[in-house]
């Protein structure tokens, strides 16, 4: 079996795992905090943390896109079927779109709800839109729907990576390991 | 033209009407809720959030010529506090926040109004929220807009003075003690 020795660059690897961990944590925190009934200090804290984490993902996503645009990703193994290469490309593109779209939809949802985001409780971030109850409902649903798409895309991504690790054993998985 | 005595009597009538009308003009103005706004801005984890009191009434007696005779009474329906979320609106009526079941109204009653620099007024009065009364002091600006007088001002208060946020909510690192009450009241003679 042919394997590829090309690896991702260290910054690409670092950004990949950092964003992955943050996305999982932010996603789980999002589910947890919206499950807390009523109004508690913990709930307010979690909402703030969730937003800070989301903004961090957005910032890292910008760095990552810049890095990706200026650096080539290693090629797929030559014996990888074309449909798999195409699908992998598609899912990667979708993931790139979502690491921007998910935090942005959350950010605008917060603004529409009349709650600006103050990063780490210190840096007030720009307010682009005024509070808007109708837009708030729409953005809440958008944020949720995009997260479900993200969940699906991440599952596909992880399953495919595991397939390369366990079944194909083409060392494709290892290219993204530090 | 009029006979001179008729003209005289008309003049007297007009003068009498003006004299009678003047105190009425200087008397109580009533707020027009559609053109008025009362909000409270608080900070949670340093995030400023503005919420609006939808229902309130204000009686203001104001004479531009003698501002020191002015008086103002404002009653606010705390159950109308709108944070932009129906669930949170219900939460803040609970015992640890407004305790609206026991104290449905907040009120302000002026005790002294005097002219200050820049055409503003200096207002002192008693603010009552959640059954706790405290003296407050704030600058008020007044301007005319058609038939209404627009009274505008900002009054910083400390929420804990009025016991707003009890128990775990006393923690001011979560919700800051300082709350800014901003108001714009358009009032006209009824």
Image (spheres, coloured by chain):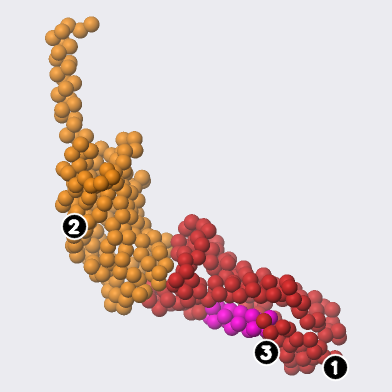
Chain colours: A red, B orange
Disc 1: which chain?
A: A
- The answer to whether dots 1 and 2 both sit on one chain is no
Quarter of the picture holding the C terminus of chain A: bottom right
Q: Percent from the top left, x then y, of residue B133?
A: 18, 62
The quarter of the displayed image where residue A1 is located:
bottom right
Question: Would residue B128 appear left or right of A113 to someone viewing this image?
Answer: left
Q: Mark 3 or mark 1, which is nearer the start of the sequence?
A: 1
Q: Is residue B97 visible?
A: no
The quarter of the displayed image where residue A23 is located:
bottom right
Q: Secondary structure at mark 2?
A: strand
Q: Residue at x 54, y 68 (%)?
A: A106
The quarter of the displayed image where residue B40 is located:
bottom left
**Dot 3 corresponds to which residue?**
A178
**Dot 1 corresponds to which residue?**
A1
Q: How many neighbours does mark 2 have within 10 angstroms: few (below 14), some (14-19), or many (20 or more)? A: some
Q: How many neighbours does mark 3 have within 10 angstroms: few (below 14), some (14-19), or many (20 or more)? A: few
Which-is-in-front pick, marks 2 and 3? 3
Q: Is residue B166 visible?
A: yes
Residue range (magenta):
A12-28
Question: Would residue A95 appear left or right of A114 to someone viewing this image?
Answer: right
Q: Residue at x 23, y 47 (%)?
A: B116
Q: Residue at x 53, y 66 (%)?
A: A107
Q: Percent from the top left, x then y, of residue B156?
A: 29, 60
**Dot 2 corresponds to which residue?**
B126
């Amino acid at each position: 079996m042919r394997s590829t020795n090309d690896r991702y660059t260290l910054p690409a690897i670092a950004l990949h795992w950092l964003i992955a961990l943050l996305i999982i944590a932010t996603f789980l925190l999002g589910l947890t905090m919206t499950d807390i009934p009523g109004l508690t200090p913990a709930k307010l804290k979690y909402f703030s943390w969730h937003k800070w984490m989301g903004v961090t993902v957005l910032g890292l996503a910008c760095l990552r896109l810049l890095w990706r645009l200026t650096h080539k990703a290693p090629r797929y193994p030559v014996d990888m079927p074309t449909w798999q290469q195409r699908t992998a490309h598609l899912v990667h593109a979708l993931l790139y779109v979502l690491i921007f779209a998910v935090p942005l939809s959350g950010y605008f949802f917060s603004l529409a709800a009349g709650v600006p985001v103050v990063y780490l409780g210190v840096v007030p971030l720009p307010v682009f839109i005024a509070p808007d109850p109708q837009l708030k409902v729409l953005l809440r649903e958008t944020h949720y729907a995009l997260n479900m798409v993200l969940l699906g895309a991440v599952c596909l991504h992880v399953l495919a990576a595991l397939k390369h690790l366990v079944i194909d054993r083409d060392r494709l998985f290892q290219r993204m390991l530090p | 033209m009029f006979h001179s005595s008729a003209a005289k009597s008309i003049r007297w009538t007009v003068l009498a009407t003006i004299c009678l009308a003047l105190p009425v003009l200087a008397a109580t103005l009533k707020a027009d809720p559609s053109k008025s706004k009362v909000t409270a801005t608080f900070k949670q984890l340093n995030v400023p959030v503005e919420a609006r009191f939808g229902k309130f009434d204000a009686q203001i007696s104001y004479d531009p010529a003698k501002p020191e005779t002015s008086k103002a009474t404002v009653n606010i329906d705390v159950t109308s506090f709108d944070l932009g979320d129906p669930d949170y609106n219900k939460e803040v009526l609970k015992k640890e926040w407004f305790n609206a079941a026991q104290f449905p109204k907040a009120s302000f009653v002026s005790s002294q109004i005097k002219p200050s620099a820049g055409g503003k007024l200096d207002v002192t009065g008693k603010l009552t929220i959640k059954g706790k009364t405290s003296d407050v002091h704030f600058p008020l600006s007044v301007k005319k807009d058609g038939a209404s007088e627009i009274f505008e001002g900002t009054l910083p208060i400390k929420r804990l003075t009025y016991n707003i946020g009890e128990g775990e909510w006393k923690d001011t690192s979560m919700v800051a003690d300082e709350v800014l009450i901003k108001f714009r009241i358009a009032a006209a003679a009824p």
